[in-house]
Image (cartoon, rainbow, N blue to C red):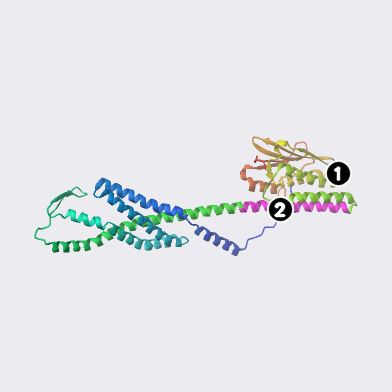
Amino acid sequence: RPVRVDQAAGACAPAAAIAERAMEDRQTQAARVPARTVLASIAGLWLCYLVLITLRSALVDRMYFLEMLGLRTIVTLAGIAVTAMAWSILRLFDDRRVGVRMVIAAVVMLPAALALAVINTQVFSGIDKRNFEQRRNPQQVEIRRDMAGNVLVDIPDPPQLTPQQLEEFQKKFAREGIWKQLTDIAIGRYFLLLAWAALYFAMVNAEQARAAERREGEYKRAAKAAELRSLRYQVNPHFLFNTLNSLSALVMTGKGAAAEQMIQTLSSFYRRSLAEDPTGDSTLEQEVALQRAYLEIEAVRFPERLLTRFDIPAALEDVGVPGMILQPLVENSVRYGVAPTSRRVTITIAAREEYGRLVLEVSDDGPGSSDGAKGFGIGLANVEGRLAARYGEDASLASGPVEGGGWRSVIRLPLDSHV
C-alpha cells in the first residue's frame, strides 16, 4: 500500500563538520591517564628493579647484604621521585604526535638519568670505600674468579709505598673511576627511564583510544536517537494532514457536531502523543489507547463503515514498545481498507507472545491493495526504519494481503521488560 510523502533532508555545512572533527581530535588527544595509574606504574617499575638487584646480590655477593638492601631502598625511592618529576613534564605533551613525544622523552630522561647516577654514587660511596680498603689489604693476596670463570690474583701493594703515596694513588683511582661509574650507571638508568616512557606513551594511546570509543558510542547513540526522533515526528504531521482534511470535509457538509467531536478527540490524541519522549518507549496499553483515540477520530468520518476490535492480553499491557509504532499501520488500514469501500470493515489490533518475542498485528478485512504492493514512504517504511534504528536485526515487519480479502501487518520485536 504505497503512502507517498515527500521528505526533505537537510545538509550539514562543511565548516561545521570540519569544526566538529577538529573538536573530536582535540578531545581524543586530551585524554589523560589517571595519575594513580601512572604512579602505580612508576612504583612497579622501581620495585621490580629493587627485587631483581636484591635477588642478584643474594645469589652472587652477600657482602654487606642488609646494609646494601637499605641503601638500595633509598635509591629506589629516589628513582620513583625523579621519574614522577619527569612524568610531570612528559604529561604536558600528551596531545602531541608520537614522534614529538619520543624526542621530548629522550631529552627529559637524560638529566633524570644523570641525577639518578649521582644519587646512586653518593649513597653507595661509603660502601665502595670500605670495599676498596678491604680488597687492597697489603698483607693479603686475594685469589678469585671473574664472571667468565677466569682465575684472578690481586697482588698486594708494594711494601715500599708510603702512606702519602697510597693516599695519592687512592685519590687518582677515585677520580678516574667515578666518571666511569657515573657513565655506566647513567646509561643503565637512561635505558630504564626510556623503557618506562615507552610504557607511559602506550598508556596514553590506550586512554585516547578508549576515549575515542566512548565518544563513538555516544555519537552512535545520538545519531540513533536523532533518527528515531525524525521518524517519530514524520508521523504526527502526516496524520494531522489527513485529519484536517477530514475535519474540513465535515465542516463543508454541515456536520458541525461531528466536527466538534473530532476536534475534541484530536486534542486528546495530541495531548497524549506529544507528552511522550519521541525516542522513548511507552507501554503497550498506552500505545493501544492512542490508537483507540485515532480510530475514534476516523469513526467520525466513517460512522457506518469503521468497526474496531482489540485483542490485547492483560499480561502484555505493561510491555514496552516504541511510541506510536502502530500508528502508520492503523492509518494504512483506514486509508486502504475503509475509505475505498462502502461496506463495513473491521480493523483489528492484536498482541501475543510468541517464542519469547512480542508480536503485534494490525489487520483489516477490507478490499486490500489493488496490486498487493508493499508501501514505502511515511507508512510501512517509517515503521521499518524505526524498528531498524531501535532494534537492528532483532525486529521485523511483514506486511501483505490476506487470502480472501484484507491486509495484515505483523511486527515481531524483542519482549522488553515492563515499562
Whether residue 406 sits left or right of residue 200 in the image: it is right
- Give how far across and how far down residue 160 sits, in percent: 9, 60
Q: Residue at x 39, y 62 (%)?
A: 103
Dot 1 alpha-carbon crowd within 10 angstroms: few under 14, some 14 to 19, many 20 or more: few
Residue range of the region highlighted in magenta in the rendering: 222-251
Among numbered discs 2 and 1, the one appearing first in the sequence = 2
Which of the 4 image quarters holds residue 348?
top right
Dot 2 alpha-carbon crowd within 10 angstroms: few under 14, some 14 to 19, many 20 or more: few
Question: In the image, what residue type sits under mark 1?
Answer: Pro
* Mark 2 and mark 1: Cα distance apart in space: 29 Å
Which of the 4 image quarters holds residue 168?
bottom left
Q: Is residue 251 visible?
A: yes
**Residue 241 is a magenta residue:** yes
Q: Which mark is residue 233?
A: 2
Q: Nearer the viewer, residue 142 or 412?
A: 142
Q: Which mark is residue 303?
A: 1
